[in-house]
């Protein structure tokens, strides 16, 4: 809708559009020597930095502009002359041509300046709302590494990333997602490293999103995933700007979403989902060991209960004799078959987790401990489950917490039940079938065109990626960027020990200097 | 949507298949883990009614005893007898076991079986022995690593011993094998070894077990020839055979030394036996060269002899050597002349290392073996004598 | 973004061939070698390996010449269309019989060692259905799966050496070199069939993304297979001795019984080995099923092979239940391999190759004359 030159008419339109929105403030001002010119400031209380508007918009307009005699001609011709004369010391000023644009900006948190007689509306950048300060990430804590995590404002988050990569090639492009929510989403990538097709694909998928209101990055993650039926996450999410920065410099693309402290990184493969930032801050021995333990944890979290069912119900010959006898003795009092026992305990643990999630703080942890210990102990004494079952369930749960990526861990939780089902029908053979199906599914899964099981699936170039998968070799060995992102600039570190071009140039420069001195 | 529909259809098809049954599911506490089995011949008087009246030959012949640990007796709340010992009879080993299912309330499970004891009488009957061994070999559930022993007397006697160490004779015997380590007193035979020996040569050496008051003793061996027990080898003879087969890891030998017959225990720590064979005058001549080293374990306090003296030790060594040589030669004679069975592995050696000689004689080995000239040479060294002179 | 161009790398083809050959053959291989040549079975094996390597070279040269074309397509070029279709049909039958055999033996073993009471039908049908999930996918996915499973196939064989070292009796391989040439030549035909599966190169080579370099990889596959078989043979002989090895139906399986991890948690390694071996059989079965649906789809001039997977499954299922027991299963396969197998795996590649030589010659000839 066109903005009219009549300020009252504009105000009327805007007020009609925003009827029943009591948090919108209309501040009429009169400017000019004889206060004959009408202007109006419109803003949303709570979304703007009020001090900014008061000091730098209203004060100059009210005080100094009154001293001038703005010429109506001038108003039509030179918008910014007025602004200059008015000394509007706002960092960002834009002119808006339609009512819709004006409303959009108003709802973001900018202030609108309506000028009588002028058919454009000025937007004064004034965003400022109460936000959570930069605090430690909740989920991905690191012992030795930075403690700043994302918060809910996307511009802050983008700036955190930019602080780490001060390269003009780091591009950050904004788009809006959601017809009504108009959520700001910024896509960040390094232009001469990331694969152009990947970037194009990211944009394509984001632009295809057609929803009303976007609430969080989780939704976006779901909507850009290629395969909706897979329980596995095809994007990596993180709260840490250092993870985003290092991923970007490997050639991946980051998507930061307003109102969510979780950023998304694509493409994601199994190895990236099992990595934690800690791996890169500790020595490579420890990191390699920890990674191997993590893989162990994944295996346990997935298969331990089903192995228990298979071994005790189908193949006790595979257990050592004494263990078999003591398991038999323990289970003698239990009225349920092994499958039902395992199932019950797993469901109980899931209930405890849910309950613990509702209650936060000290109550939550206490319930967790109380629930776990007491219920487990009592169940054993009542003869409902065998003690071995309690141990197995406990180990499984702990292992699933060792998985760094929450989405991946959730997938494992889900699949664990399926495997228990197959184990209950066909024992070890059933588990093998289930694992084959799982493996086939993972082999078919792609994240943005990159095979999910990337380093392990091709004998060839991709083998080099193994340096950073199950183990982590020292930085000096990982000279090239990972293969799975098909980057355009392959070398990560020009070189380490003084053979690189930069160093040589520096040295030559020094020599030149010395020559000149002489 | 098409994809999701397909998945749903798939699930609908799979679920009924799964629900129809888990065919193999047996709860672990419903299984009876058999740890030891003993096989005897059914006493004539105890033969029950003939199962199949049309065939008189098929009367019950086997009496098989099983040891089943009592699950309820395990753990801190254990109560009741620690093991169940049950016997059953039938016409063939497999059938006898199946008979048991009519009396035992759990499903028999043999994968944890550890010990098989074959009664003396059964071992003397080559048909029965072959039946038993085939049923074991063919069965996938019974591990090739179980130990097989022959009982002096009946197996039932052995399994029923009320031992002070361990109620479950199966576990007791298997521990003896595990922990005896490297003694030469018996031949630690597993089912796999037994089957291999019998297939290759029809001969084997089975460790012998005897029942005592409240324990069992494993020593010596039963000599099996042509699938039949033909005699026993006592401890010392067994040891000789073990030396000849180069299966000694360590052993204790007691010799008498010096004029007043002091007993000197000499512990062998290492031994190696080399063989050599050639044909001389139409006869095969085999030479066994045993090299052993060991420690002097005991002498007698305050004796004039100086143990740290090289000459004294050399004297002792030659005493040991001649003592040993005599023992081994006696055993060999017994094997050649009395038993006429080659359990010392001459045939194996010839077939591998001297195939030309072997191909000449292999068809008639049973008769050739007693005639071959076996020479034994022993070279023993005393390495350590302890910390005193 | 990777282009999905329906090509797989040579390494992936190597993985496919290795994992499809070392399937069921490895179980009974020591026995058949010992039955034919005693302790000299390994010599037989090496000879067969060399012969197979020669045939593989012929196949590679043949398929590289027609790079990009599947067997059915270049078959039409070399032979007349009806003849080539006939050959394709024969090949399809061969593959399905082989697949039926593999899955039947697998089910028998699973029944023996793992699930005694579960009906054989269930074991077979579940394995077939699970395999079909992979086979309905694209060739890239299949290649990736093969690479993933390759270590599962190879590493246990290597581990076996280390674990069994204390129990080995190396003298069991003696005496050496006491074979008769006549016995050997009988045995060679049988042991070439331990390598059955290399003929899948006829079907899969057309997907290679670098056909010129393929020969190296294919010969490497044969080398890996030969070495693996040699290891299993030697282990068998050294642990059991030749008489016992000839007596056991599946010496490799019984080998796992002997293995004992010192002081270990798992008393019976057999369980782990069964699990690992299921994956190996899966790899073999998947390759056979994939190839057979490819051949069938080309026969019907279809484009997508995936629609032909599900119809093939009932065929394989029914065929696998035909033999009454293990003995007749081995019998049936013996018959097939003696006629059909030799034709497909040995005669056909040589014949096709010779025809290409002629065709080339005659083309040149016609240009000269005309």
Image: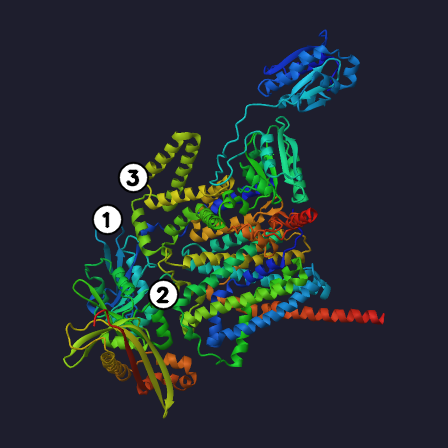
Indicate the chain on which mark 2 is placed: B
Mark 1–mark 3 distance (CA, rounded to whole Å): 17 Å
Q: Quadrant of the N terminus of chain A?
A: top right
Q: Earlier in the sequence, mark 2 or mark 1?
A: 1
* Residue B385 x %, y %: 24, 72
Which one is nearer the viewer's eye here, A69 or A42? Answer: A69
Q: Residues within 10 Å of mark 1 (few under 14, many from 20)?
A: few
Task: Name the residue beneath numbered marker 1.
Answer: B78
Q: Residue A207 in the image: x percent, y percent? A: 66, 35
Q: Is residue C64 visible?
A: yes
Of A255 and B235, nearer the camera is A255
| Location of residue A221 (image quadrant) | top right
Circle 3 chain: A
The circle on residue A382 is: 3
- Give the SS element for disc 2: loop
Disc 3 on helix, strand or loop? helix
Helix, strand or loop status at disc 1: loop
Mark 2 neighbour density, 10 Å: few (under 14) some (14–19) many (20 or more): many
Q: As drawn, which residue projects farthest toward the right?
A: C370
């Amino acid at each position: 809708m066109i903005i009219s030159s009549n300020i009252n008419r504009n105000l009327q339109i805007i007020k009609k559009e925003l009827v029943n929105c009591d948090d919108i403030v209309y501040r009429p001002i009169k400017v000019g020597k004889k206060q004959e010119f009408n202007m109006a400031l419109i803003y949303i209380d709570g979304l703007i930095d009020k001090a900014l508007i008061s000091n730098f918009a209203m004060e100059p307009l009210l005080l100094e502009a009154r001293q001038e005699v703005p010429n109506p001609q001038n108003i039509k011709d030179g918008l910014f002359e007025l602004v200059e004369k008015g000394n509007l010391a706002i960092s960002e000023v834009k002119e808006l041509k339609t009512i819709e644009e004006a409303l959009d900006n108003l709802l973001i948190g900018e202030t609108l300046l309506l000028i009588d007689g002028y058919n454009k509306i000025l937007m004064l950048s004034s965003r400022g709302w109460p936000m959570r300060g930069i605090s430690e990430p909740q989920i991905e804590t690191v012992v030795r590494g930075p403690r700043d995590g994302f918060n809910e404002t996307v511009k802050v988050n983008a700036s955190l990333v930019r602080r780490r990569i001060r390269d003009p090639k780091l591009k950050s492009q904004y788009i809006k997602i959601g017809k009504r929510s108009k959520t700001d989403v910024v896509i960040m990538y390094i232009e001469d490293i990331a694969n152009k097709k990947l970037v194009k694909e990211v944009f394509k998928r984001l632009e295809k999103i057609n929803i009303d209101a976007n609430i969080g990055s989780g939704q976006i993650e779901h909507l850009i995933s290629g395969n909706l039926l897979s329980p596995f996450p095809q994007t990596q999410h993180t709260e840490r700007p250092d993870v985003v920065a290092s991923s970007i410099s490997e050639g991946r693309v980051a998507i930061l979403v307003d109102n969510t402290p979780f950023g998304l990184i694509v493409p994601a493969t199994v190895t990236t989902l099992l990595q934690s930032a800690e791996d890169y801050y500790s020595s490579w021995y420890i990191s390699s060991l920890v990674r191997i333990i993590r893989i162990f944890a994944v295996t346990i979290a997935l298969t331990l209960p089903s192995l228990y069912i298979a071994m005790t119900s189908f193949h006790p010959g595979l257990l050592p004799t004494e263990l078999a006898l003591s398991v038999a003795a323990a289970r003698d009092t239990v009225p349920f078959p092994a499958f039902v026992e395992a199932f019950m305990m797993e469901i109980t643990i899931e209930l405890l987790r849910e309950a613990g999630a509702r209650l936060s703080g000290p109550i939550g942890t206490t319930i967790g401990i109380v629930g776990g210990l007491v219920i487990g102990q009592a169940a054993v004494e009542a003869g409902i489950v065998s003690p071995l079952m309690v141990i197995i369930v406990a180990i499984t749960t702990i292992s699933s917490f060792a998985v760094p990526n929450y989405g991946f861990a959730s997938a494992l939780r889900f699949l664990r039940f399926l495997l228990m089902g197959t184990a209950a029908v066909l024992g070890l053979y059933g588990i093998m079938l289930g694992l084959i199906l799982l493996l086939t599914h993972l082999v078919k899964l792609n994240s943005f065109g990159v095979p999910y099981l990337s380093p392990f699936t091709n004998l060839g170039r991709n083998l080099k990626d193994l340096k950073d998968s199950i183990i982590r070799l020292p930085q000096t060995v990982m000279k090239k960027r990972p293969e799975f992102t098909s980057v355009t600039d392959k070398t990560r570190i020009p070189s380490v020990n003084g053979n690189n071009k930069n160093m040589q140039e520096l040295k030559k420069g020094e020599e030149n200097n010395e020559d000149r001195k002489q | 949507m098409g994809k999701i529909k397909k998945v749903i259809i798939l699930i609908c098809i799979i679920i009924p298949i799964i629900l129809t049954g888990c065919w193999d599911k047996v709860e672990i506490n419903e299984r009876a883990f058999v740890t030891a089995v003993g096989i005897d011949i059914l006493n004539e008087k105890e033969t029950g009614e003939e199962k199949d009246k049309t065939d008189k030959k098929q009367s019950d012949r086997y009496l098989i005893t099983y040891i089943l640990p009592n699950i309820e007796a395990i753990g801190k709340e254990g109560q009741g007898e620690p093991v169940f010992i049950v016997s059953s009879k039938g016409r063939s080993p497999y059938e006898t076991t199946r008979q048991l299912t009519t009396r035992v309330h759990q499903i028999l499970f043999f994968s944890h079986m550890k010990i098989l004891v074959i009664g003396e009488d059964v071992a003397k009957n080559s048909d029965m022995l072959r039946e038993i061994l085939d049923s074991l070999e063919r069965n996938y559930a019974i591990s090739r690593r179980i130990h097989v022993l022959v009982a002096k007397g009946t197996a039932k006697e052995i399994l029923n011993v009320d031992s002070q160490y361990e109620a479950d004779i199966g576990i007791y015997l298997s521990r003896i094998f595990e922990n005896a380590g490297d003694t030469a007193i018996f031949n630690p035979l597993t089912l796999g070894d037994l089957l291999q020996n019998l297939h290759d040569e029809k001969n084997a050496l089975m460790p012998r077990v005897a029942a005592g008051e409240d324990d069992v003793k494993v020593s010596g061996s039963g000599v099996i020839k042509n699938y039949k027990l033909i005699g026993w080898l006592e401890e010392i003879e067994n040891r000789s055979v073990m030396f000849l087969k180069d299966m000694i890891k360590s052993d204790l030998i007691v010799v008498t030394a010096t004029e007043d017959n002091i007993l000197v225990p000499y512990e062998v720590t290492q031994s190696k036996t080399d063989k050599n064979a050639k044909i001389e005058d139409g006869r095969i001549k085999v030479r066994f060269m045993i090299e052993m080293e060991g420690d002097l374990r005991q002498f007698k306090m305050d004796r004039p002899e100086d143990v740290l003296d090289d000459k004294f030790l050399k004297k002792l060594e030659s005493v040991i050597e001649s003592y040993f040589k005599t023992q081994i030669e006696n055993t060999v004679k017994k094997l050649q002349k009395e038993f006429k069975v080659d359990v010392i592995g001459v045939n194996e050696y010839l077939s591998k290392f001297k195939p030309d000689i072997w191909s000449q004689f292999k068809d008639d080995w049973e008769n050739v073996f007693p005639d071959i000239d076996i020479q034994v040479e022993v070279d023993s060294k005393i390495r350590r004598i302890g910390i005193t002179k | 973004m990777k282009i999905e161009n329906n090509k797989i790398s040579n390494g992936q083809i190597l993985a496919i061939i290795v994992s499809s050959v070392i399937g069921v053959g490895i179980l009974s291989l020591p026995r058949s070698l010992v039955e034919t040549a005693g302790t000299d079975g390994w010599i037989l094996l090496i000879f067969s390996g060399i012969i197979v390597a020669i045939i593989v070279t012929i196949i590679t040269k043949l398929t590289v010449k027609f790079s990009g074309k599947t067997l059915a397509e270049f078959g039409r070029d070399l032979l007349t269309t009806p003849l080539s279709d006939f050959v394709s049909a024969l090949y399809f039958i061969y593959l399905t019989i082989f697949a039926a055999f593999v899955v039947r033996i697998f089910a028998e073993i699973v029944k023996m060692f793992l699930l005694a009471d579960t009906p054989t039908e269930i074991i077979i049908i579940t394995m077939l259905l699970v395999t079909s999930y992979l086979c309905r996918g694209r060739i890239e996915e299949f290649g990736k799966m093969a690479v993933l499973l390759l270590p599962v196939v190879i590493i246990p064989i290597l581990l076996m050496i280390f674990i069994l070292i204390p129990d080995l009796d190396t003298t069991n391989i003696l005496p050496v070199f006491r074979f008769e040439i006549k016995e050997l030549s009988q045995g060679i035909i049988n042991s070439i069939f331990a390598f059955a599966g290399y003929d899948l190169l006829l079907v899969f080579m057309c997907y290679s993304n670098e056909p010129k370099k393929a020969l190296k990889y294919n010969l490497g596959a044969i080398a890996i297979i030969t070495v693996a078989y040699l290891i299993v043979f030697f282990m068998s002989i050294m642990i059991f001795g030749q008489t016992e090895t000839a007596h056991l139906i599946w010496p490799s399986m019984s080998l796992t019984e002997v293995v004992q991890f010192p002081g270990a948690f798992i008393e019976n390694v057999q369980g782990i080995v069964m699990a690992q071996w299921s994956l190996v059989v899966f790899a073999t079965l998947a390759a056979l099923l994939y190839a057979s649906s490819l051949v069938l789809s080309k026969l019907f001039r279809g484009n997508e092979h995936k629609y032909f997977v599900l119809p093939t499954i009932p065929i394989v299922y029914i065929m696998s239940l035909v033999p009454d027991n293990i003995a007749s299963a081995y019998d049936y396969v013996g018959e097939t391999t003696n006629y059909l197998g030799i034709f497909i795996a040995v005669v056909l590649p040589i014949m096709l190759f010779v025809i290409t030589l002629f065709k080339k010659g005659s083309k040149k000839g016609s240009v000269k004359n005309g």
